[in-house]
Structures are given as structure tokens and as C-alpha cells.
Amino acid sequence: MADTFTTTTRTGFFSRIKNAIFGTLMGLVLVPASIGLLSWNEYRTIHRTHGLNEGAGLVQSVADPAVASPSLGGTLIHLNGKADTQERLRDEDFGIEEQAIRLTRKVQMFQWVEDEKTEKRGNKKTKTYTYRQSWVSGRENSASFKRRNGHENPLPKFGKEELEAKRVNLGAYLLNKSLTGSIHSGETIEWTDELIAALPEDILVNASTDGEYLYWSEKGKPSPEVPMLGDQRISFNIVRPTRVSLVSAVNENEPEQLRPYSTTNGEELERLYVGDFSAAEVFDKMQGENTMWAWILRAGGFFASFIGFTMIFGVLSAFTDSIPLVGSMTRGIISFVAFLMAIVLTTLTIAFAWVAVRPLFAIPLIIVGVAAAVMAWRSSRKKSDTPASVYATEAPVVLGAEDVVR
């Protein structure tokens, strides 16, 4: 069940100019910010790489984690073993109790969702709002909907809850909160007859189950196939004791306590992975994460510079948006030039950040950046060198044969 309505607005000339000037100012902030992000990211990546290389050369694998040796105080160690706990976690609302590292209640409500789609053509902007009912975590704020009447979402009775064991050990070593939080080998609990029978009576009378989900409704027994507005479905995820591999440092005063290891360049090393991995494999994974974040932040810096340049040049399209085809052509040229300039800025920023530490990698990047700069310059020259007669409205000049020969 869904309904749709649209709104159309037109932006006047002076409003377009005002918005374009504001956009230009924002772009002038965004472009330098992208340079800062890209430069910091290269420093962070190289700094982290050096720290990880140092750690990989110092780490000691502990053969028997059942004994915490005081002689390892301050040492970077590698552990393999079972992350275990004796604590039992209990969800008081639903009566589920398990010996576990983590017990998470996930809740969705069948509710109204607003989808907004915007289309811009020249100085005309059309927004289409579509309303549909769907299972969504949390609660959509229907008070902020464009059309609130008939799309009010009720308040949910149950919310998400996460319980975590306070003490999790790997042999004699106590995992700190950061290490425990990295254990994500959870599984979904199936609603068995035993679990259903343990439900409180006030929940059971308005509940039905289907595999991993318990459905609850204020209006009586809910139907999973035909949910009603405000119905909730609840599932539980449990992280039981499991085998893990980690690198961390042993606390000098309390050898059973683990803490992050600080390298000579100030990098903190501490990481846990679910499964059995050697020390070399753990550091390979950490280097892989470092590389992944480097590329994510590079992409973020490029995107920020592209948006910034687009906003800076956007004032040009403000003058042409009301002219059919010309406005679209102007925006296309702006996007193309902004794209090339973003490539120039990104590659040159990364290259110059590498000059001091990776000159062999920096030189090809500088070449790419210069090539993109030349392409952007030539593109702008072609546009500026276009004869004025192309845009003139007077009759075209007919060349004679002698002119053609010349």
C-alpha cells in the first residue's frame, strides 16, 4: 500500500544567483578541506604502515595462553585461543537467557516510510514523495513527513537492546572492551517451543513466531503474512564463546590485563579477529585494513574536491538555467571540467605528499596530474576560442573559393 504526490517549484533569476554565490563560497571552503583530508590521509597511511611494520618485527607468539607470564609485561604479543566467559546474559522482557559474550535484541516495526525523489530541469525543481509501509528498524519520524496526515507512525513498545559480558578471557588473559567488541561471530536464535513457552504471558497472548522472528501486535495475534501498522518483529543475535586471534600488549603491573601497544612513532596496535590466524596473518589483515581506509579516504577527498569545484563554477549555470538546452549543456561542461580538476588536485596532492617518502610512486602520479591539468586547460581553451560568429544571430558569411584555398 503506497501513495504518491509531487510538488513543483520554480527558482527566480535573483534566487539562482544568490544560491550560486553561496555555493561558490561553500566550494571555496570544500576544496581546501579536500586538500587537507588527502594530505592527512597520506600521512596517516604511511605513519600506520611504519608502525605495523615495526610491530610485525617485534611481536611474540604466546604458546600457552593459559599462563600469564609477568616477564612479558609491556611486550607486544600474539594469542590464539577460545574467547570464553562464564556469565549468563538475560533479556528481561522476553526471558531469553544464555551463556554468551553478547546478546542483541533486534527490533523492527511495520510503519510508514517516506521516499523523496528530486528532479531538476532548468529553473524548475520537482519533488516526488512516495509513502509505503515497510519493516524498519527504529521509528521513522512521521512528524517530519511532507504529508503527515494519514501517515502517522505509532510509538513502538519494544526497542533494541544489547547485553555484553563484563569479563571475557582468552586463557589467563582478560580481554578489554575494545577486543571484546571486535568479536562478531554471532548467530540468530531460532524461536523454539521452549523459548516460546518461557515468554511472559502479557507478550505471549499478542505474539506469533516464524523461524527467527517473533511478531507482536497490540491488536491481538499478528499475521506475519499480512502485518498491520505498528506491528513489531523481534529477533535475537547471540555471540557464544569462540576461537579468536589477537595482537595486544601485556600490562606491566597486571600481566593478565591487555592494552594497546604503542610503537616508537606513536601508533597504537591492538586487533582481534575471529578464527585461528598466525601473527603474520594478523598483521597482513591489519595492513589490508590500512590500505582499504587509505583508498576510502582518497575517494572521499576526490569526491569533496569534485563537489567543491562544481559549486565554485555553479554560478555560470545560474545565468543559463532558464534557457532550454543551454542550461543542461553548461552544467555538463562544468561537471566535466570539475571532474578533471578534481583528478588534478587529488593526484598532485597525493603525489606531493609522497615525494618525501615514496618518490618512485610520486613521479607517475605527478605525470597523471599534469596530464589531467593539460586536458582541462585545452578543454577550456577550445571553449574560449570558439568564434563569436557561432553565437551571432546575423547571416552567415559565405566564403569564396580563393578563401578556401588560403
Image (spheres, helix red, strand yellow):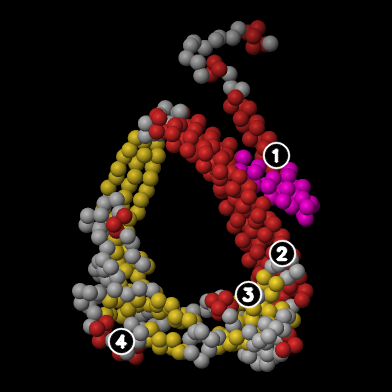
> Residue 354: x percent and y percent?
74, 52
Helix, strand or loop for disc 1: helix
Ranked by sequence position, the earlier of labels 3 and 2 is 2
Identity of the amino acid at label 1? Answer: Ala
- Which image quadrant: the C terminus? top right
Left or right of residue 59, residue 127 in this image: left
Identity of the amino acid at label 3? Answer: Arg
Which residue is disc 4 drawn over? 199
Which residue is disc 2 drawn over? 49
Ranked by sequence position, the earlier of labels 3 and 1 is 3
Which residue is disc 3 drawn over? 271
Which residue is disc 1 drawn over? 371
Ranked by sequence position, the earlier of labels 1 and 4 is 4
Q: How far apart are marks 3 and 2 (CA)?
A: 15 Å
Left or right of residue 138, residue 295 in this image: right
Q: Distance between the residues labelled 1 and 4?
A: 68 Å
